[in-house]
Image: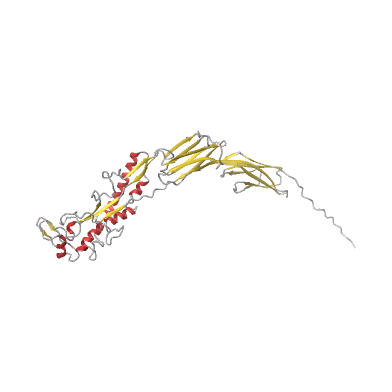
Amino acid sequence: MRYSVFWVPALMAVPAWAADVTVSSSADVIAVGNSATLTCTVTPSTYVSRVTFSYEDGAPSQEDTSAPYEVQRTFNVAMDDLTVTATVEFSDGSPTQQATVDVDVVGLALSGSTSPSRGWSVAYTARSDPQGKVIDLFEWSYTAGGVVNTWSDYDLDNNDVSTWAGKMVISGTLSVQAVVCGVTCTKTVSVTIAPRNWSTPQSCNVDNESDWGSEPTASAVMGENRDRESNDKLRYFVPQANDGDFSQAFSVSGVTSGPCQGWWYVSGSTLVCQRETVINKYIKAGGPAPAGASQNFYDRNAEVCLDDLMDEFVQAVGNHEYRGTPATARSEEGHYGRIENGIYDAEIAGDPRKAAEGLLARSSASLWSLINLTVEDVEDDLHAYAGGESWSADGPNWGGPDALGSGLRSTWNPGSQTWSDCVNGVEKF
């Protein structure tokens, strides 16, 4: 019997050896938002398969697989002694090795409301981040409306804190810059001013002057909707010192300190829309008779033209001046309803207090000019919508036979001292 003998060599052990591993940063102090180059040096580097860089601040790790082993990292979290760890893996089975380096990441902390209501006083405070770093100079700026306001604070009280305060009236960009631990740091925030919840009060006193009206001729005005104090149909918003002068209805203020210094804004308003309706006394039941007439308008038309519908006729006049038939808020069938609707709907006219709330200028005179033009524009648009009569030809006030005030009427002729036949329509309000 023949035997074959094979020699089996013993398994060779993997040699254990250690490389020299170091990690370095291109900067010892880094401003928040800036970058540094991190380099891991491995000697010898023959069997390096991968170097992974990890960060104490929790940022995602980075890796490199070829020499030189380095990465670029942007630091966004302020931290003293932020540790960067480089972990080296080898392809020959050697154990992983690590090295670390500490860097200081510094910045500025900025507090203060970024959405204040217009006119609020806000204090913006800056300090180092992390706290406690020495700062000798804070450079502030606020950019808004094409204007840049600046302020330099030399920290004369040596507390390493700076506060810029004042009334905030215009949206913009707030920025503060300072040197912290030898590096320039900047903190910038957007400030959005919240408009005040302004609206123009509206009211209407119905049939407010019982003694108003002229003899019921064919051209006589049956009713009006007008400003309560001036009796002017064209004055929708008061007080007005003169036509188009709203200096008594608003107050303005200039900002004297802080980021918005030099801006003028609308600080208050007493603007109102206060209307009244009036109905011609000659057309009412029990109203006076025209000079020379034996009957008044109401009795004449109840007898000859409108039968038992005179109360409805008078009501239709009142409803036309107020909120339509039936009386409904924002109705387009009444003068006051149309005024309400026009103020409510910015596409028609809009609310003048809302329109003026955010007006700004660099001088008081310029701001007053803007206020007057703005409110006057709203008033003109409102009159075009609510002041005419073209919308009243059809509808529940007059319109067809089912309308409240349908039917022709008789009017007084003072020249002939006679009543007309039932031939007059409702054309004057």
User: Which residue: 35% across, 45% down?
Assistant: 268
> Looking at the image, how many numbered discs can be counted on the residues?
0
Determine which quarter of the picture holds residue 81. Answer: top right
Q: Quadrant of the N terminus?
A: bottom right
The image position of residue 348, as x and y in percent, is 32, 53
Q: Quadrant of the C terminus?
A: bottom left
Tell me if residue 312 comes above or below residue 196 in the rendering: below
The image position of residue 279, as x and y in percent, is 21, 56
Look at the image and tell me whether residue 343 can be seen.
yes
Tell me if residue 304 comes above or below residue 152 in the rendering: below
User: Which residue: 15% across, 62% down?
Assistant: 299
Tell me if residue 396 comes above or below residue 261 in the rendering: below
Determine which quarter of the picture holds residue 252. Answer: top left
Determine which quarter of the picture holds residue 319. Answer: bottom left
The image position of residue 195, as x and y in percent, is 40, 48
Horizontal side, residue 370 vs residue 215: left or right: right
- The answer to which of 216 and 26 lies nearer the viewer is 216
- The answer to which of 12 and 140 lies nearer the viewer is 140
- The answer to which of 245 and 248 lies nearer the viewer is 248
Residue lying farthest right? 1
Horizontal side, residue 312 vs residue 168: left or right: left
Look at the image and tell me whether residue 387 can be seen.
no
The image position of residue 185, as x and y in percent, is 53, 39
